[in-house]
Amino acid sequence: MMSKNNAHRVPTPTLERLATYLTTLSELAEQHVQTISSSDMERLTGINAAQFRKDLSYFGEFGRPGIGYDVEELRSRMARILKVERQQPVLLVGAGNLGSALAGYPGLRAQNFHIVAVFDNNYNKIGRLLWDLEIRDVGGISQVNDEFQARIGIIAVPSNAAQEVMTRLVDAGVKAILNFAPIPLKVPAGVVVRNVDFVQELTVLAFHLDEDIEMSRPIGQVESL
Amino acid sequence: MMSKNNAHRVPTPTLERLATYLTTLSELAEQHVQTISSSDMERLTGINAAQFRKDLSYFGEFGRPGIGYDVEELRSRMARILKVERQQPVLLVGAGNLGSALAGYPGLRAQNFHIVAVFDNNYNKIGRLLWDLEIRDVGGISQVNDEFQARIGIIAVPSNAAQEVMTRLVDAGVKAILNFAPIPLKVPAGVVVRNVDFVQELTVLAFHLDEDIEMSRPIGQVESL
DNA sequence: TAGATTGTTAATCGATTAACAATC
DNA sequence: TAGATTGTTAATCGATTAACAATC
């Protein structure tokens, strides 16, 4: 048994790629592809075949030398490792435009993420519906999560409210936070945060304009399926 | 003169941090802070002071030994380097929930990104308004961009349409693309892509659940301002 | 001058890629 | 068996951090 002991040593880039592999494997499974090699995966994802094998090696052995990988088996084991083999409940804080887009995004459900409750602090919104969910008072997160036991939260509120919302989520038992507010959160030990910042992304893109871009091999460039 | 020649050698993580520095410097400038040291920046952003100085060193010299950096001067030079000192026009493709949230997001304007046109392929949407912008036929991107000359595009369409939309954007003269479709784009040389994938982010977070998370020092952990 | 802080070089750390023995 | 492909070790590459001479 190794997984638990050194799981925290898995590089973050590896985890990001694992999510990509899982998506690709799901598509292949739908097309009833039986077997795939690491170099097939390189063609499909743009990720180096050695990288692929190395990434898997953090979690055990998955393939057969000379043969390759069984698509369905690998998919299922990846899903297990990434903890998305069952529905994962998620709390959403912020019922503005972004929160609405997230709650209505079918891709989440497709990958087993299930937004179970939405919160806001605006009394004009509280009690109304966001898609099929009632918008609840942000003050009641803990109470509500006693029922749902979600450990993932999404922060989709303005920057000035983000830190306080983080505290409420953590108090409610959330251990992992996806933060859309463009401000660095100070979080207690044991809580993981990932930040998504549109403006930062656009700024990086803006920098590359007017460059003598000879190479420009962006992350994610690949053969199409 | 160095900037142009080796600008393409600037590490991507450096560019991402530069965007963060710029945000922080803008806040400091608003508070009329005159001078700041690299260790002050470490306190504010969580980014190592040596890292900060190293990042700046790719672009020249900005501070005075023994003194620190002039906030307004550094902010303005950063904005220039990142090409956000003037309004940057942006094309948005996809007038769904996500596109709507992006078009209505005040943070873009605040950082000088200006969505100048919105496109969709749904004839029920074409001609209607998204906020203050008329939704246009995706077939007309090139024509419309003859006027706007935007070089940044945002793809907020379903995965199966993303590759085709990329082609249209590039044909219209776009050089940098922010892609929200969870599919790797194959882009021609000279075009830069950055991907934002909510589900991938959530998947990485899900992995960390149930870990014996002793350390968990997330990117972006900092002292508050 | 003494104290503070820069810009940069060198040392460390970590991630990617190549190479290959093991094995189907 | 011969050919293919894995899992893993070793080599390479690149990014982060520490240390310090230069300088305000």
Image: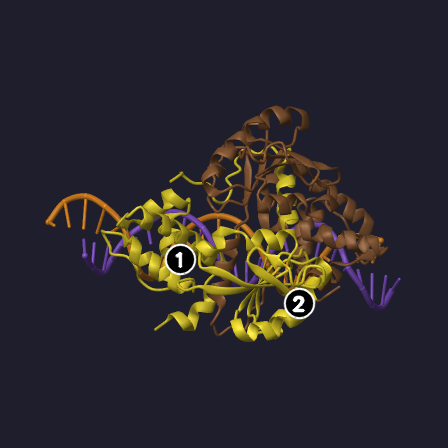
Chain colours: A yellow, B brown, C purple, D orange
State the residue in front, B51 or B105: B105
> Residue at image x 39%, y 60%?
A79
Answer yes or no: is residue A149 visible. no
Residue B117 % position (x, y) = 65, 34
Amino acid tagged 1:
Asp
Q: CA distance from mark 1 to mark 2?
A: 39 Å
Residue indicated by mark 2: A138
The reply to whether residue A218 is in sight is: yes
Q: Amino acid at mark 2?
A: Val
- Tell if the residue under mark 1 belongs to the same chain as the one under mark 2: yes
- The residue indicated by pointer 1 is A55
Q: Given the image, what chain letter belongs to the residue carrying mark 1? A: A
- Looking at the image, residue B149 sits to the left or right of residue A39; the answer is right
Please tell me which of labels 1 and 2 falls first in the chain: 1
Drawn side of residue A23 relative to residue A103, left or right? left
Disc 2 is placed on an element classified as: helix
Image quadrant in which the N terminus of chain B is located? top right
**Based on the displayed image, in which of its 4 quarters is residue B34 positioned?**
bottom right
Residue A153 is situated, as x and y percent measured from the top left of the image, at: 57, 64
- Residue A186 lies, with reference to residue B129, above or below; the image says below
Residue A26 versus residue B123 in the image, above or below: below
Indicate the chain on which mark 2 is placed: A
